[in-house]
Image (cartoon, rainbow, N blue to C red):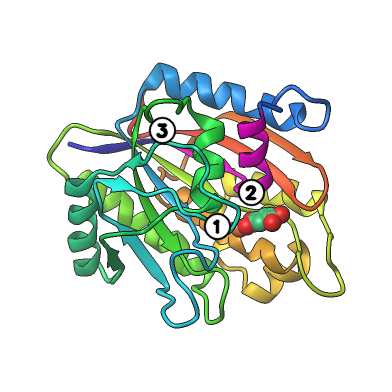
Amino acid sequence: MARIIAGMGSPHAPAVGAAVDRGDEESAYWKPLFDGYKPMRAWLERERPDVIILFTNDHFTSFFLDVIPTFAIAVANQHEIADEGWGRRALPEVPGHTELAWHLSKTLVDDGFDLAVCHRLPLDHGSLAPLSALMPHVKEWPVRVIPILVNVLHFPIPSAARCFELGRAIRRAVGSFEDDLKVVALGTGGLSHQLTGERFGMINPEWDAEFLDRLEIDPQSLARLSHRELIERGGTESVEMIMWLCMRGALSQAVRRVHRNYYHATLTGYGQVLFEDCENLTR
Ligand code: DHB
Ligand code: FE
C-alpha cells in the first residue's frame, strides 16, 4: 500500500532557483534560507521517498488566459523544464509516476474532485525552485514527482477549505494504491508577499509565524479563512499559501514537527516546514 509519510512546505520564488544555479547558497544573503533546506535534504536522503506529490501553481507558463484549470494533475512519466522567457534552466527532466497519477485522477473523480488531466505540462519556477533546492539533481532526480496544480492567479480561485479537502482526498487516494510507495506531500509558495499595487513589497512576519503555528496544530482554522482575509494579512500573492493547506490536508491530524525555518529577504516571506505523519510513519 502507498502511504504519505510526511509533508513539507517550501517557497517557490524564482530567485531561489537562480541562487541554486549560481551556487550562491552560502552567501550572506541566501545562507539563512539554504541552511533551512539542510535538515529537509538530510531527511529526504535518509527516508528516500519514492514519490513527491507537489502542490504548486503554474505562472502563465503552461496555461494562459485561454484555459485555466482550477485543479490539474500532470500524469506524464517525464515532466519537461519550461522556458519562462529567460531560457530553460539546465535541469534534467523530472520523472513522473504515471500509474499513481492515473490512480489519483480516477479515484479523485469518484471522491468529488475533477482534476484536469495533463499529459504534457512543462514545469516552471513554482515546481523547479523548490525541487532544485531540496534535492541533488545534476544528472537525474532521486524521486518521482506528481505535480498537482492549483489556480491561485486568476479569480475565481478555489477556497482554502477546498484545498484542504483536496489534500484529504489525496490522502485517501494514495492509501488505496496497491504498490508499496513512500510518498511525501510538498506544498509550495508564499508566505506573505505582494508583487503588485500599493502594498508592493509588503511582508507580514507576524502573520507568517501565526500561519505556520496554526498549520501544524489547527489547520482547519486556516481552511475557514476567506481569500480576502488571507490577502489582507499576507498580501495579494500570498493567497498561494492555500497550497500549503493541500499539503496539510494530506497528513494525519496530529503531525510531528521535525523542522521549521523562516527568513525574509526582499520581497517574500520564506517559510520551510517538515512534518512527519503520525499515523503512517511510526518511530
Ligand atoms: C516571485 C514569484 C512567485 O511566483 C512567488 O511565488 C514569489 C515571488 C517573484 O517573482 O519574486
Ligand atoms: Fe508563485
Name the residue at the front extreme. Answer: 87
Answer left or right for 83 relative to 20.
left
Q: Is residue 86 above or below residue 91?
A: below
For disc 3, the neighbor class at 10 Å (few under 14, some 14 to 19, many from 20) is some
Using the image, determine if residue 167 lies above or below residue 69: above
Mark 1 Cα shell of 10 Å, populated few (<14), some (14-19), many (≥20): some
The kind of residue on which mark 2 rests is: Pro
- Element type at marker 1? loop
What residue is at 36 percent from the left and 59 percent from the top? Answer: 121
Residue 134: in magenta span: no
Region rendered in magenta: 6-22
Residue at the location (76% across, 29% down)? 32
Q: Quadrant of residue 197?
A: bottom right
- Any magenta on residue 11? yes
Q: Are marks 2 and 1 in contact (CB under 8 Å)?
A: yes
Disc number lying in front (3 or 1): 1
Residue at mark 2: 14
Residue with the mark numbered 3: 278
Q: Residues within 10 Å of mark 2 (few under 14, many from 20)?
A: some
Q: CA distance from mark 2 to mark 3?
A: 33 Å
**What amino acid is found at the position of numbered circle 1 in the picture?**
Glu
> Which residue shows up at 23% across the image and 33% down it?
181
Marks 3/1: CA–CA distance: 39 Å
Helix, strand or loop under label 2: helix
Per the rendering, the mark at residue 84 is 1
CB contact under 8 Å: marks 2 and 3: no
Q: Is residue 283 visible?
A: no
Q: Quadrant of the C terminus?
A: top left
Does 247 sit left or right of 237 as displayed?
A: left
Q: Quadrant of the rendered structure where residue 178 is?
A: top left
Q: Nearer the viewer, residue 144 or 173?
A: 144
